[in-house]
Image (cartoon, rainbow, N blue to C red):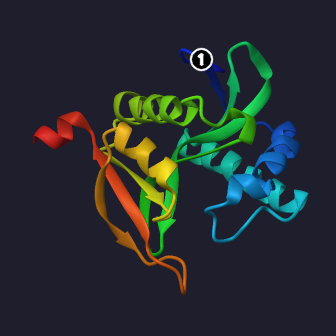
């Protein structure tokens, strides 16, 4: 069942999303800060989509497929909150990837706000983390706008500067 925010529509990914997922994740521009680079094949996209569908089935939440309200059949990105391994520690991570034509319009901030609202109000999660490369200024600004605070560093890319870790706590948990 799709969820509509002010400008965006979120829904659970579907098997038919694999080509759009590959178009976005395989685009070199959307991977400028991804140490792994662009997704290499449609098979890779299928594996990632299968992983997301398994998360939805087992956890009841995960990354959404995202469209603009005025064009609900055209996906502009994927994102939300989902479990992610920070090396050996499992965290609930806020993440997103948008098509280039969706950049600069505040969609990442809107998605982040909506995903955090769902994480705290609907799921009752105690905290959410964000993992970002240290030179990805735009994503760092998004996390800061969302109220996420620097939490530490994660040496997750051999031979490169550590990623920055941000965290936000559930408002009730933070007051305890």
- Binning the other alpha carbons within 10 Å of mark 1 as few (below 14), some (14 to 19) or many (20 upward) gives few
Relative to 89, is 150 on the left or the right? Answer: left
Q: Between residue 116 and residue 69, name the one nearer to us.
A: 69
Residue drawn at x 70%, y 46% is 53
| Outermost residue, bottom side | 159
Residue 38 appears in view = yes
Q: Between residue 99 and residue 169, name the one nearer to us.
A: 99
Q: Which residue is mark 1?
A: 7
Displayed quadrant of residue 33: bottom right
Question: Which quadrant is the C terminus positioned in?
Answer: top left
Displayed quadrant of residue 88: bottom left
Residue drawn at x 32%, y 52% is 167
**Residue 68 placed where, x, y %?**
69, 21
Residue drawn at x 67%, y 60% is 32
Residue drawn at x 83%, y 50% is 22
Assign a secondary structure to mark 1.
Answer: loop
**Residue 135 placed where, x, y %?**
49, 63
Q: Determine whether 155 is above or below 115 in the image.
A: below
Q: Determine whether 144 is above or below 3 in the image.
A: below
Q: Between residue 18 and residue 27, name the one nearer to us.
A: 27
**Residue 165 placed where, x, y %?**
38, 61
């Amino acid at each position: 069942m799709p969820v509509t925010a002010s400008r965006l529509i979120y829904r659970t990914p579907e098997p038919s999303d694999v080509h759009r997922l590959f178009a976005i994740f395989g685009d070199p521009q959307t991977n400028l800060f991804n140490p792994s680079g662009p997704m290499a094949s449609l098979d890779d996209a299928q594996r990632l989509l299968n992983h997301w569908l398994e998360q939805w089935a087992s956890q009841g939440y995960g990354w959404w497929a995202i469209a603009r309200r005025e064009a609900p059949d055209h996906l502009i990105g994927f994102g939300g909150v989902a479990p992610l391994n920070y090396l050996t520690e499992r965290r609930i991570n806020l993440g997103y990837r948008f098509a280039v034509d969706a950049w600069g319009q505040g969609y990442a901030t809107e998605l982040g706000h909506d995903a955090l609202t769902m994480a705290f109000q609907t799921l009752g999660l105690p905290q959410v983390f964000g993992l970002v490369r240290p030179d990805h200024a735009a994503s760092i600004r998004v996390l800061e706008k969302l109220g996420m605070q620097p939490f530490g560093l994660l040496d997750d890319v051999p031979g490169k500067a550590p990623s920055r870790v941000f965290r936000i706590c559930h408002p009730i948990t933070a007051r305890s």
